[in-house]
Amino acid sequence: MPEHFEIGKTVMGRTIECLHFSPPSYAKAKAKAILFGAIHGDEPIGIHCLGRLAVELAAMPPGRETWIIPALNLDGLAGGSKNNANDVDLNRSFAAKNWSSDHKPGYFPGTSAESEPEAQALSALIAQTGATRLIALHSPFRTVNWDGAGQELAEAMGKLNGYGASSDIGYPTPGSFGSKYGVDQGCEVITFEIPMMDEEQAWLENRSALRFALDLP
């Protein structure tokens, strides 16, 4: 069974939960993985996919050490809002070299880089675990986007779900998770964009791609 623990609290005090899965003892050492959903509270479809993935991993362990955070932005999720309870877009709040206080309406990056407890909790988990395969589940586009060293992985995942892969989401993303961990630190960062659809259909379309990321190279 997976280890279930807390990595932090949201602005409003909700518990950010994490599941830790270990590979079989015979598995070869591979890069550690972290997957997370709902960094934007109005993108809940990834939560269902990660929930289904967690159930499967409990029965069939991954090929690498894996942490799953089903939902990072629990306050936004509860309120149906993209941003957190401080109205910060968490995916503009990371301490990347391109973080900027300048922003478009709706993309407030916080008063300073990683000012928000949700971003702090995720960053601390990455630092503690040393994970370098980092996968964020988003909506509503239909692509497997990559930063840093993620191109090969993104292209393989994009073939499996039929979404294709891309290095450019189409607009600037200062202070994004991918900017910090992909561009600046060279990790394998995947922004896994799932179109809005029935939750179970989303899982069926993306199961093989998600398992590939955890089981294969």
Image (cartoon, rainbow, N blue to C red):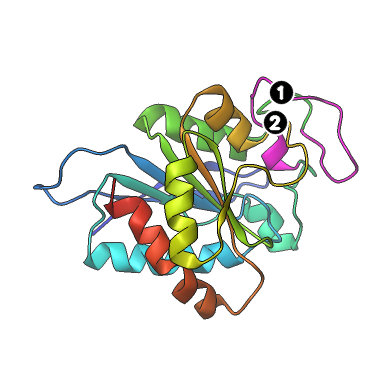
Residue 178 in which image quadrant: top right
Residue 142 point in image, percent of width and height: 63, 62
- Residue 189: x, y in percent? 50, 39
Q: Quadrant of the N terminus?
A: bottom left
Q: Say which quarter of the image contains residue 139.
A: bottom right
Q: Which mark is residue 175?
A: 2
Is residue 107 a member of the stretch shown in magenta?
yes
Residue 98 circle label: 1
**Distance from the alpha carbon under mark 1 to that under mark 2:** 6 Å
Density class for disc 2 (Cα within 10 Å; few <14, some 14-19, many ≥20) is many
Residue type of the residue flagged with mark 1: Asn
Q: Are marks 1 and 2 in contact (CB under 8 Å)?
A: yes
Instruction: Name the side, left or right, on which 92 lies relative to 27.
Output: right
Q: Position of residue 161 (x, y in %)?
A: 48, 66
Provide the major secondary structure of the magenta segment.
loop
* Residue at 26 percent of width and 63 percent of height: 58
Q: Does label 1 or label 2 sit earlier along the sequence?
A: 1
Placement of 173 over or under 111, stated as above or below: below
Which stretch appears magenta?
89-109
The residue most toward the right is 105
- Secondary structure state at the residue bearing disc 2: loop
Among all residues in the image, which is located at the extreme top?
Answer: 97
Q: Residue at x 51, y 69 (%)?
A: 48
